[in-house]
Amino acid sequence: MGKRTINLDMSECENREMRLGTIIAWDGSASELIEQSGYESRSQRKGSGCPGNGSKACKLCELNSPMNQQTMCTNAIVECQAGNLTDCILIQHSPIGCSADNAHFNLAFKKGLKKRHKPVQNLQIYNTNLLENDMVFGASDKLRRTIREVMERHHPRAIFVSMACATAIIGEDIDSICDELEPEVGVPVIPLHCEGFRSKHWSTGFDIAQHGVLRQIVKRENIHKQPDLINIIALWGTDYFTEILKPLGLRVNYMIDTASYDELAQASEAAATATFCHTLGSYMATALEEHFGVPQVDAPQPYGVAGTDAWLRAIGKIVGKEEETEAYIQREHERIFPKLQELREKLRGVKGFVMTGSSYAHSLISVLRELEIEVDGSVVFHHDPVYDGGHENSNTLKTLVDSYGDIPHFTVSKTQPYQLNALFKRVHTDFVIIRHQGLAPEAAKLGIPSLAMGDEHYPVGYDGIIRTGETLLDILSRKKFNQVLSRHARSPYNDWWLSQTDPFLLAHQPEILDERVNLKQKRKGK
Ligand code: SF4
């Protein structure tokens, strides 16, 4: 095994900002972002560092806005990762408020289990419910009691313990408590350092949950290789990967959501690891490659015809089925091309806009461009200048621009509804695809047909491009509804803000906030 960039000896996982130079606010063209990211020079330093001055913490210059409307945190992501396992328990060592989104994640978990043909169950998350006294005197005993109680009630295969802002502030030593209780309860007790203020982007939470699984669940001994098993790092999406890989005689091992302890443990026995999105999967895929010798699929993501071809070829090469793969690709082209042509005829010249997570957006735009839809602008919720592992073919933004052309207005912004009006004033679009549900109704109220893409696997593979095209035709047919809705929806923003055309006005001219306050006071005669 070569040089290791991921350190599994530490219980804490290095933040994305430090490891990859992640940013959450930027505005320009996609080609400018590629140039400023310096993927190649960063990847030569294996996942961290700066192409400019060499400082490890140096990052792509980002915009700094004084206004931040809504977001998730790393603790919430851990909740929907470690808390979405079928036979393990997550204990949130936090005030009860940090568990507020459990109801929402429970719904996603149940739907995910159904899509994966598993028995439906509730998510298994406990909360230590920190109160005022706990904040003053500490809550270690409360955590010990909860771990014992959880073991007695559920006999889980593993217990995860997550940090929150409050527990980090009072300095709860969850590592020691997990170490102390593990021999007593007899299953892995896994600390997860995911306090919300740890990282400015929620996606660090994916890395933290994966870090815990890699350290304490994935098998290191008695490994019996399964040459037909492909790890797919995913969320709760429909099991389309089995449809894609079964014709090549391959099986899928989904991680982390909806998996069981044994499914996670066998990750080191798989032939290869792939993901529906490098943003979410590159940490675990790289660690499996570096520490367990499981290669990651070095190819663009499996979206659109070109991406799916390349992805299948890379897998075919790893499993030694190159000829079978070529024949399979040929058959699939012949099967889908008539329908694809029909969709292109109907969608040619339509304008689309994407607002999703980073690497996923790059691939979704590829799907739209293959459907001959024009994409002049898009928003990604953050940007990683490089992915873990630094594989050349993982540079999805470069693949997008090289294969399908530039995107003139490519914005990095973390789910900020107040920017929508200016964004859609700047770039005309006939529809928008959004992956975070709260934003889709906001765009719909502006008169734009919006698709809230809840099932992240929907556009995957050859059938994914057909599914997406057909759904977009449905969305476009309700244009009139959105126009009527926009006439009746009241905006919470004032006319001054709605007249702006720069979504980052507050970052470019922060002094304008003071000017507005002074103006308001003057009008009131103060
Ligand atoms: S930001 Fe902190 S307090 Fe808020 S939910 Fe996340 S962990 Fe809890």
Image: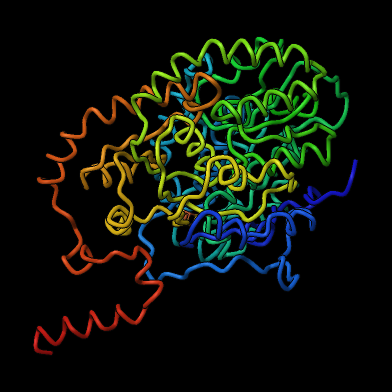
Vertical position of residue 287 compared to residue 253: above or below: below
Vertical position of residue 421 compared to residue 158: above or below: below
Image color mode: rainbow
Vertical position of residue 31 compared to residue 186: above or below: below
| Front-lying residue, 77 or 172 | 77
Q: Quadrant of residue 509?
A: bottom left
Q: Position of residue 6 (x, y in %)?
A: 77, 49
Q: Quadrant of residue 413?
A: bottom left
Q: Position of residue 117 (x, y in %)?
A: 52, 14
Apparent side of residue 257 relative to residue 284 in the rendered image (left or right)? left
| Front-lying residue, 303 or 221 | 303
Q: Quadrant of residue 59?
A: bottom right
| Front-lying residue, 344 or 317 | 344
Q: Quadrant of the C terminus?
A: bottom left
Vertical position of residue 476 compared to residue 142: above or below: above
| Front-lying residue, 102 or 230 | 230
Report whether residue 297 is seen.
Answer: yes
